[in-house]
Amino acid sequence: MHNLIEFLENTRKENGSKTAAEAADGILSFSELRLSALQISGAIYGMRGAYCEKKMIAVYLPKSVKCLCAMLGVLYSGNTYVPMDCRAPANRTKLILELTTPSCVITDIQGKRVLVDIGFQENKIILCDEITLSQAVMSNESVENVIRKTQDIDPAYMLFTSGSTGVPKGVLIPHRRVINYINWARDFFEIESNEVIGSQAPFYFTVSAMDIYLSLATGSKLFIIPENLFSRPKLLMQCLNEQNITLIFWVSSVYHHAAKADALDGISLPSLKHAWFVGEPMASASLGYWMKKLPAISFANLYGSTETDMTVCYPIAKAPEPHDMIALGLPCANVDILLIKDDKTAAQPGETGEICIRGTCLALGYYKNPEKTNASFIENPLNAEYPEVIYKTGDLGEMRDGLLYFHGRRDHQFKHLGYRIEAGEIEAAAQRFSGIKNVCVLYDEKKQQIALFYETSQEINEIEYRRALAADLPIYMLPAKLIRLETMPFNANSKKDRMLLKKQYMKEA
């Protein structure tokens, strides 16, 4: 295999009539999903006059079956899809479109209004609502031609992550990475065609690749869980029961909130077989709650990033003690983990080093950003024999008893609600407000809160300040706490004294 659409092509031949995806906007079988995707690829063809392959095409739609069809339609056209957050501030949406310069954007009526308002060319917008059954579709011969011409190192899609300078970074994901990742997961966890996958992650978040392509690869049903249920844990558990969900792959915070709400009280979830988590570290108390309530479920801790996908996995056999650190585990297929110290030598067992990754799991780099790419995707300092690119995660880890353990970040990135966030992006937005001299963003791991310290010599209307931040930042990046300082503390190296602020914030919080 060297193209992700081969998963759907293979599955629909044997399971064409099976339900492929279900959401509030409809239900499609695998054959219907393929037809809808081909109709969208036909619309792309109609707009461009010919298939212009290996171009960026943005998908600006809410998470839905319709959005899934659009993303697959882009792949069938031989191009690269860029899923976007429809709820992001207009300024951020405009910035991403300017960085991406997509050949066209697939959206709906509501999305079109937003795009036109921020200045995107109307003649480059495809309205998926206007694509009908009469739309010309690609022939089987054309599909085979796209598959034949695709190399597995070609980008399948691009996801945007937070950037330290305030500018988001586009991460290019090649076909081979996802193919390797899905084939590993299918075999390792013995996933069958009768699974029902309960999808939580937004389609612009890297975790969603497991939901989507594991479904297409195995013939499992993808059920897109209504987003509002994730803030109502008891109703969320009822949904899992009603939909006979067998597999969930959620960020750790969802499990944590469910445990705090005792959402499993009186609910057995007899259909659920697999519960995997990712994102920020899982609290042992939260995992213990789930394992006690659902002792027959297969739990697993997975670790990865947008730049690397899932790279290590730890199947958990028994509930952890309250203060145990949960292991990240061992590498997945075609992945190697290196722990490299500051002196560019390998960390020995028991020593802490930066987690670096090599293998098929790597992204191609950052779109139109060679400087950032070269800073993160580096030559392996442990290999002087031939060229070998590895990815510096910025995470610190330790090998202990043959397993990898996480020891925090070496810079100022953090993970919040499953998103990897650069403090610098929030700081760049916060600094633009009138009257602000210096700002510093810290993350409270215990409370899972973002704190913004700001220095000003004048009174600031915090309501207006928060409103200004919301115009530039997505919801998950907005600070929960604003702390005014008369003077920003700096250390001996003339850098913001984050350690002092952390101690002060933790004391006051």
Image (spheres, rainbow, N blue to C red):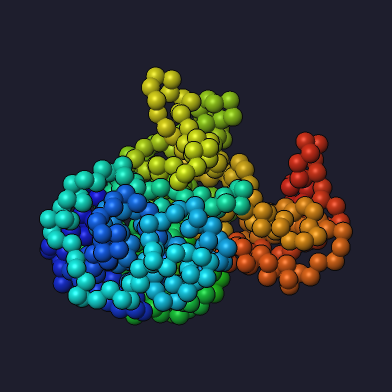
Q: Residue 134, position in %: x, y?
A: 19, 75
Using the rendered image of the protein, determine whether residue 99 is visible from the camera's viewpoint. yes
Q: Quadrant of residue 82?
A: bottom left
The residue that appears at 73% across and 47% down in the rendered structure is 498
Q: Quadrant of residue 130?
A: bottom left
Q: Nearer the viewer, residue 99 or 193?
A: 99
Q: Is residue 49 above or below residue 499?
A: below
135 is higher (above) or lower (below) than 291 = below
Tell me the residue at 44%/48% (across/down): 171
On the rendered structure, is 470 left or right of 364? right
Image quarter hosting the C terminus: bottom right
Q: Could you say where residue 396 lies in the image, as x and y percent from the top left?
A: 56, 40
Q: Quadrant of residue 60?
A: bottom left
Say how many tags the image has: 0
Residue 316 at x, y percent in the picture: 41, 54
Q: Position of residue 115 (x, y in %)?
A: 48, 68
Pick whichever, 132 or 487, lies toward us.
132
Residue 403 shows in the view: no
- Residue drawn at 56 percent across, 30 percent down: 341
